[in-house]
Amino acid sequence: MIAQSTIIFVIIGAVVAMLMVGGGIIGATFIIRPRMLLKKRMNQIGMIGDSGATDKAESRRQRRIQEKVKQLEAKSESKGFIDTVNDMLLQAGLNIGPGVFFVLTLISGTVVVGGYIVAGGALKYAVLALAFGLYLPKYVIGSMARGRQKKFTQGFANALDLIVRGIRSGLPINECFSVVAREFDPPLGEEFRLLVEGQNLGLTIDELMAKGIERLPTSEYKFFAIVTQIQRQTGGNLADTLSNLSDVLRERKKMRDKAQAMASEAKASAGIIGSLPFMVSGLLSVVNPDYLMLLFITDTGNYMLAFGAFWMTLGSLVMRKMINFKM
């Protein structure tokens, strides 16, 4: 009887163990495994609540942005002289080629040197006049390009807000670009108009934005182009991304305005110090012109003027470097 009861107890134990193992397998198959697969999938796309997975997704996005920035910098550094001149003309919004620019440079140098000689200037300083004349067109075109980029940046945050509202209301991105092209003045509206027309002609948004960066190489437009390209590759909510970019641009503007306000006193001091020699020279030319003319009619006076102009220029450049902040 004891042996028979022992056998029955062993059989019952084996059946219970088999039921427990089978239940575990069934639970793992129908309950635990789907949850594990869901967690793994959410981890891959960066939607899981785990902060480590979110940090990994964010670091991947940051690495892609850094790679895009490095590619843009490498592309700009590998350009030749002619391409650099052509980009400079595009940034100024001029519809001329490098050949016309070189002709204008020669004409400017010739006119400045001719005017200097006709005015009675010494021939030994004609080289300086020639250098000034050759540099003048480049300076003017550079000023036009900087003004164009500044005007673009001022309204760029508002344009992004308009695009965000359009996307959230259900409009396609191309139609949002069309609205910006109609509502904003050049160069902002013109740039988005070129984006729309290029897409209608069959060009990709990546090619169009690469060309746009050549025309407007601002950090704001570069970041907009990079974010848009990465968003098209990885997917996600473009409206939220552009909204965050708009907030960043507004904060940058606030910081830039604050820095300029803090540097206004230093700029006023630099302007007063820089104007003092000219003010004193003007007063001396009225009170005692013969005393001042020695600087212009004698070799020693000419050397003193050149020496003073050199140090004056050097001091102005140092002060300008100290009070100008790039952000």
Image (spheres, rainbow, N blue to C red):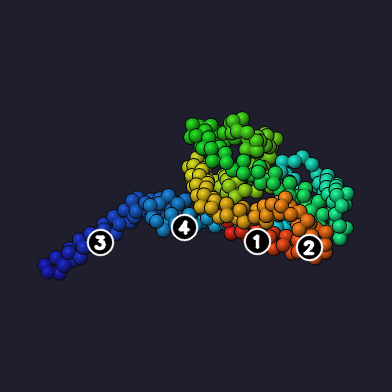
Q: Is residue 84 left or right of residue 240?
A: right
Sequence-first tag of 2 and 1: 2
Viewer-nearest of discs 2 and 1: 2
What residue appears at the point 67 percent right and 52 percent down from the top-left corner? Answer: 279
Label 2 sits on what residue type? Gly
| Residue matched to label 3 | 17
For marks 2 and 3, give the CA distance: 111 Å
What residue appears at the point 86 percent right and 57 percent down from the top-left corner? Answer: 122
Q: Is residue 62 left or right of residue 312?
A: left
- Crowding at mark 1 (Cα within 10 Å: few <14, some 14-19, many 20+): some
Viewer-nearest of discs 2 and 3: 2
Viewer-nearest of discs 1 and 4: 1
| Residue matched to label 2 | 301
For marks 2 and 4, give the CA distance: 69 Å
| Residue matched to label 1 | 315
Label 1 sits on what residue type? Gly
Label 3 sits on what residue type? Ala
Sequence-first tag of 1 and 4: 4
Q: Disc 1 on helix, strand or loop? A: helix
Sequence-first tag of 3 and 4: 3
Kindly check if marks 1 and 3 are in contact, taking CB atoms under 8 A apart as contact: no
| Residue matched to label 4 | 56
